[in-house]
Image (tube, rainbow, N blue to C red):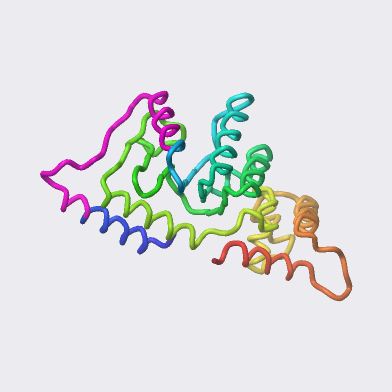
Amino acid sequence: MPLDRWDQLTQRLEEAVDKLRGIPVGVELVDDDELVRRRIAEAVESARELRAMHPVGTPDKGREEQKSRRRVLDALRRGMAMRTIVHASVLDDPRKAARIRELHASGDLHRVVDEPIQQVLIFDRAVAFVRMTPVAYAPGALVIRQPSLIAVLVDLFERTWVGAREVTEPVQRLTAREREVLELIAEGRSNSAVARELSITEAAVGKHVAGVFAKLELPASEDVNRRVLAVLAYLRGTAR
């Protein structure tokens, strides 16, 4: 997100806080993770809409991950509208990427961003959960019910959503290294220049380029330049 946009949102948040000085703010500090989970579960039961932002994937594994997936799918079946923004690094984990695409196909619409984001859950413009400390998996949360503060968080989400890219775009199937290689190719670098920049062999670059072509479904052809097509796919995926 451009810096001036963050500045605008920060200013709006400061203005909202200034207006609330001396009156109940409607912000509760909950430092017990189990209580936070219960509060979120209660919100899920009654909410009709959820906006979520996640800088990292869920720490759940095994049965907990299966329970989490079922809760989301059950909420979708009840009619809850869900939109989720995740950081691109989450897709580097094949297991997490597969789960995200499953949820997206089921109706929990996902988009991806490259810039840093914080964990936020907003239910029905009525209650929001914000990580108490902006560190992945940090305990505790702020439970916000003050309408002015929630309005700022909703605005942050919507602005970020507009600039994010679809999780189903082919470029999202690339590994972190393949994205690095493609980014440098988009700058006009040759394979040898990419190899020098990344401190890898030119043969390794060639393998990564071949992987990019395969994942972007760009078959060899005398009629097209696959490097150009790959760059165009990259630009469509990141220059929104």
Query: Whole-percent x and y of residue 90?
Result: 58, 43
- Residue at 64% x, 61% y: name it: 184
- Check if residue 33 falls in the magenta segment: yes
Relative to 113, 130 lies left or right: left
Which sits in the foreground, 236 or 50? 50
Query: Whole-percent x and y of residue 237?
Result: 61, 62
Q: Is residue 213 above or below residue 102?
A: below
Relative to 191, 51 lies left or right: left
Query: Whole-percent x and y of residue 111?
Result: 56, 54
Relative to 181, 48 lies left or right: left
Q: Is residue 115 above or below residue 22?
A: below
Relative to 193, 155 lies left or right: left
- Residue at 26% x, 46% y: name it: 146
Magenta residue span: 16-43
Furthest residue to the right?
Answer: 222
- Residue at 69% x, 52% y: name it: 178
- Dividing the picture into quadrants, the one containing residue 122 is top left
Which sits in the foreground, 94 or 106? 106
Q: Is residue 71 above or below residue 222?
A: above
